Image (cartoon, grey):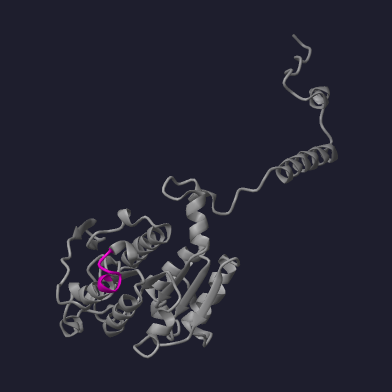
Amino acid sequence: MGGHADPPQHMPAAVRQRVGRAVPANEMVFASIARMSTYEERMSMEEPIPRYSRHTLLRVFGEEGQDKVEKSRVFVAGLGALGSLISILLARAGVGFLRIADLDAPELHNIHRQILYDEADTMSGLSKARVAEKRLKAAASNVEIEAVDVRIGPDNIDHLVRDVDVVVDALDNISARYHMNDAVLARRIPYVFGGAIETMGNVMTVIPGGTPCLRCLWPNPHEVSDHPRAATVGVLSATATAVASIQVAETLKLLLGRQEDLIRGLLTLDLWRTRFRVVPVEPNPACVCRTKADSAKMRSGGNPDNE
């Protein structure tokens, strides 16, 4: 009864020998270092987890899908609440080439919803495009980033969209949105539109020749020119984040060629009330998107497969 119990057999021999006596501090330190070395050696022998493995594991993505993403070219127009999140998510997803454009500089009232910028950026004197370029390259050095300091308008839109696979509209200027709509229709480039105001947002994906466009939704620009703006009614940061995330998902679907999974119509949401619905949008026969589609079919002999 008075003797020491035998140490458990699952203990290492060196430890069993020490049971019943105090272990010197230096031995404990050496044992700890030995365990760390063994762990580090084991980890160094293991293959690193591929960077995009959590995307390639997706049934809708796979290795082939990731390869398409890495070979793609995307233009993000505007780097405010929507564009800042869209650009960082696309860069981290591995988009091969990412063009970003915005002439504005970060301001303190932007910080609550424009996640690419911090307080120091509001005093840096740099444009949003230059700050974003730095952050995106730090997050995804394998992605080619082209930052453009420009106020997007009719004089430069065609040049900005000329060589990309998808355009993502994160603008806050209704006039620029209509010019963007017309430019992508002319070049037959898919286009993901998004907007957020107060607690509400909307997203629509436009396929030239295949879906209604922005002018089908709002034929008269003057009728929407007086819509509320964040500067007057505010915007919930989470609403902007939700809209931007949906725009990114739509963009990835386009890049992967999964058009059957796209939103069909105008997705509207009220995040505060947790309400989502898709509103059908009918093509306007007199719209520019219909006339351009008809002209393209005539040039291809009326066969859609030739387009």
* Corner quadrant of residue 211: bottom left
Which residue is pictured at 24% across the width and 59% down the height? 264
* Corner quadrant of residue 304: bottom left
User: In terms of depth relative to the viewer, which is nearer, 172 or 294?
Assistant: 294
Q: Residue 283 at what x, y percent from top left? A: 17, 68
Which residue is pictured at 22% across the width and 68% down the height? 212
Q: Residue placed farthest to the top in the image?
A: 1
**Residue 136 appears in view:** yes
Which residue is pictured at 84% across the width and 36% down the height? 24
Tell me where the magenta segment starts and ends, as one range.
297-303
Q: Residue placed farthest to the bottom in the image?
A: 155
The image quadrant where one finds the C terminus is bottom left
Q: Does the magenta portion include 301?
A: yes
Q: Residue 65 at what x, y percent from top left? A: 47, 54
Which residue is pictured at 22% across the width and 62% down the height? 265
Q: Is 159 above or below relative to 65?
A: below
User: In terms of depth relative to the viewer, which is nearer, 237 or 140?
Assistant: 140
Q: Residue 172 at what x, y percent from top left? A: 31, 79
**Residue 112 appears in view:** no
71 sits to left or right of 224: right
User: In terms of depth relative to the viewer, which is nearer, 120 or 130?
Assistant: 130
Q: Residue placed farthest to the front in the image?
A: 301
* Corner quadrant of residue 75: bottom left
